[in-house]
Image: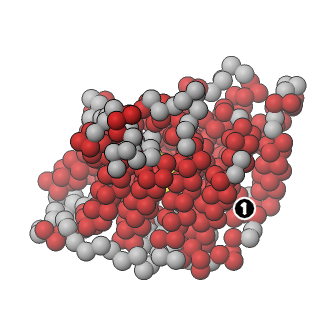
Amino acid sequence: MKKYFQFEELGTNYRTEFMAGLTTFLAMAYILFVNPTTLSLEGIDLPAGITGMDKGAVFTATAIAAAIGTLFMGVIARYPIGLAPGMGLNAFFAYTVVLGYGIPWQTALSGVLVSGLIFIVLSLSGLREMIINAIPANLKMAVGAGIGLFIAFIGFQNAGIIVGNDATLVAIGDLSSSSTLLAIFGLVVSVILLTLGVRGGIFYGMIITSIAGMIVGLIAPPTSIGHIVGEVPSLAPTFGQAFSHFGDIFTLQMLVVILTFLFVDFFDTAGTLVAVATQAGLMKDNKLPRAGRALFADSAATVAGAVVGTSTTTSYVESTAGVGAGGRTGFASVVTAGFFLLALFFSPLLGVITSEVTAPALIIVGVLMSSSLKNIEWDQFEIAVPAFLTIVAMPLTYSIATGIAIGFVFYPITMILKGRIKEVHPIMYLLFAIFVLYFIFLT
């Protein structure tokens, strides 16, 4: 095993890799509770005919998808990178596709499955380089920042800090409300932990907030060991549902949904791989070794996640926490996968991890994703316009897909008018046409 994972060559050992794997798990563990809350649409007043997913089943699906994806990444690609259902993509799935478009979650899962299959084809072929080069870097960063603002907006809503208002659309909520105060407390605690450099600060912040909620009587505390450790929730409500509505994906609206799933996952994964590999010193001649294997592991995890019942599974930049703890090999990912499987038995904790507890995690993740704003070339107006519109449209229209569509429509226009037509890849014109049709027929 040491030889396979190149322990001697990379100057590491079992103890270091184990601690790195545990560190990565703690940094990612919040998704075990945030994802079920998001996909179940907990706390949302749902219109007639729209239902969220079963919370217990999503918890199990989240843990299984994370374990499978992370194990694939560790064994096949041999990178110390953890995978789990992605933040942003789960919000797009729940709030835009299901709640906004009124598409059944079963059909949305079919879209995730198809996007994963396309991702596998791209990963196994030379097309991945062409796709990566087709989308301008500025738009990639704008999409990441826009998703960050969208996630943060949802977090503020779930916390009750931002509420609806007939006159101004949105307004500040009742900050004296006990549930809102609990969410604000959680946000302050999480900010303090992360500012102090505590690895897994988001997860620890949720635990501390839950305990505080129990102390003040807002959350019912566990009364026995059975309320902490219990049976693994059944996958029956979600398993295989991606196949039940497969025939419903052949519409223009679902085409846009699938493209959004694919686009965000593809570039989020590529960016995370480069970021983690660079920090770990694994880049060679500015290239990522075994890039195809890593992308295949990610895409296969998305397919597996869709089958068991969760939104797109993707690589987590939180893996840098494990790298910071010394992780250099795929064995760290094997350890992380093991902890996700162990977490399956802690599903009763879903009862104490409420939407007020998870709201700070959404806001913090939004802050972290918005860091890409600094890399956009704002001094070039033809770049700034599509980038800005992409970013602001996501939270203002409550749709990641709409934000991407607006940016991808404006980008060719501003570049052509500026005389930079040769810099626009032909694929961008194809996406331009698709998104114009999207606005004509679906909005």
Instruction: Say which of 150 and 330 sits in front.
Output: 330
Quadrant of the rendered structure where residue 235 is?
bottom left
Give coordinates of residue 115: x percent, y percent.
63, 60
Q: Residue at 25% across / 64% down in the picture?
A: 346
Q: How crowded is mark 1: few (under 14 residues within 10 Å), some or many (20 or more)?
A: some
The answer to whether 111 appears left or right of 135 in the picture is left
Query: How are the colours assigned in the image?
Result: secondary structure
Quadrant of the rendered structure where residue 20 is?
top left
Does the rendering let one see residue 62? Answer: no
Instruction: Say which of 380 and 324 sits in front.
Output: 324
The answer to whether 285 appears left or right of 197 in the picture is right
Quadrant of the rendered structure where residue 175 is?
top left
Give coordinates of residue 296: x percent, y percent.
57, 54
The answer to whether 74 appears left or right of 210 in the picture is right
Q: Mark 1 points at which residue?
A: 255
The answer to whether 369 appears left or right of 399 in the picture is left
Q: How many numbered discs sit on the rendered protein? A: 1
Q: Residue at 80% across / 61% down in the picture?
A: 441
Instruction: Say which of 120 and 240 sits in front.
Output: 120
| Circle 1: residue type | Leu
Give coordinates of residue 176: x percent, y percent.
29, 46
Q: Residue at 36% across / 71% down in the picture?
A: 56
Q: What element carries label 1?
A: helix
Quadrant location of the C terminus in the rendered image: bottom right
Give coordinates of residue 289: x percent, y percent.
55, 38
Q: Residue at 37% across / 62% down in the picture?
A: 63
Does the rendering let one see residue 130? Answer: yes
